Amino acid sequence: MKITLIVAKAKNNVIGKDNQLIWKLSADLRRFKNLTTGHHILMGRNTFESLGKPLPNRTHLIITRNPDFQAPDGHFSFTSLVNAFIFCNKMGVDELFIIGGGQIYQESIDLCDVLEITEVECEPDGDTFFPEINPKVWKETERESFPADEKNEYPYSFVTYKKI
Ligand SMILES: NC(=O)c1ccc[n+]([C@@H]2O[C@H](COP(=O)([O-])OP(=O)(O)OC[C@H]3O[C@@H](n4cnc5c(N)ncnc54)[C@H](OP(=O)(O)O)[C@@H]3O)[C@@H](O)[C@H]2O)c1
């Protein structure tokens, strides 16, 4: 199973504040939708709460230490990352997307094969951070950069890293 991490992060590695995103970037939302639709997406319980409801056409795997947590119908919860990975292997999942948040990125980045990063050209205040990308482990293989416009409040780049 290929494991792909997807994130939008600021230059200072901030990814969120008060359990919310902190920018308006419709191109990033569109890319997230294009990449993840039809797939299994794994997230921490905080990120799931921040979504409000499941995203359409994706199977949500929610990580929580609460064994009584009830995932919505058609979605699943697990008390560890390992249990979620075992489930995906049993289900024959070909590509799993890790969609956040800060705790889950920190705990899973070493287990991923590909990082799909949106680099956002800003340095906001925040309370949740993405870990440093170790250049000895990750090689940048693609980069596309775009200016800010009326639907994207900061310049941004879509960057792909593959594990060396
Ligand atoms: N910019 C982006 O691309 C992006 C993407 C996603 C999220 N975010 C932002 O990130 C923030 C949320 O991140 P976060 O770090 O607060 O939370 P999180 O990683 O989404 O979820 C943390 C929760 O996951 C569970 N958990 C974590 N590690 C676990 C483990 N090893 N075993 C079992 N359960 C585990 C715990 O749930 P319980 O407390 O229920 O036990 C923990 O409280 C928000 O601001 C959100 O907007 C940004």
Image (cartoon, rainbow, N blue to C red):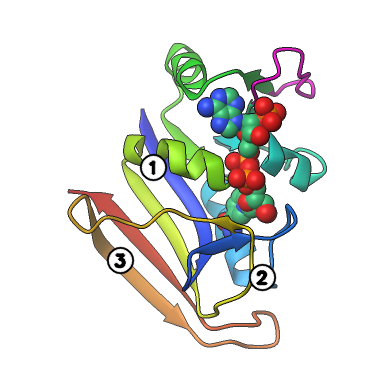
Does 71 lie within the magenta span? yes
Marks 1 and 2 sit apart, C-alpha to C-alpha, by 25 Å
Q: Amino acid at mark 1?
A: Ile
Amino acid at circle 3: Glu
Label 2 sits on what residue type?
Ser
Question: Does residue 90 appear left or right of residue 62 in this picture?
Answer: left
Q: Is residue 76 above or below residue 99?
A: above
Sequence-first disc among 2 and 3: 2
Residue 130 in the image: state x and y as whole percent.
48, 55
Q: How dense is the environment of label 1, judged by Cα within 10 Å: few (below 14), some, or many (20 and up)? A: some
Q: Which residue is mark 2?
A: 26
Contact between labelled residues 3 and 2, with CB atoms less than 8 Å apart = no
Q: Is residue 37 visible?
A: no
* Point 21% across, 49% down: residue: 137
The percent coordinates of residue 9 (x first, y second) are 51, 64
Disc 2 crowd, CA 10 A, few/some/many (<14, 14-19, 20+): few
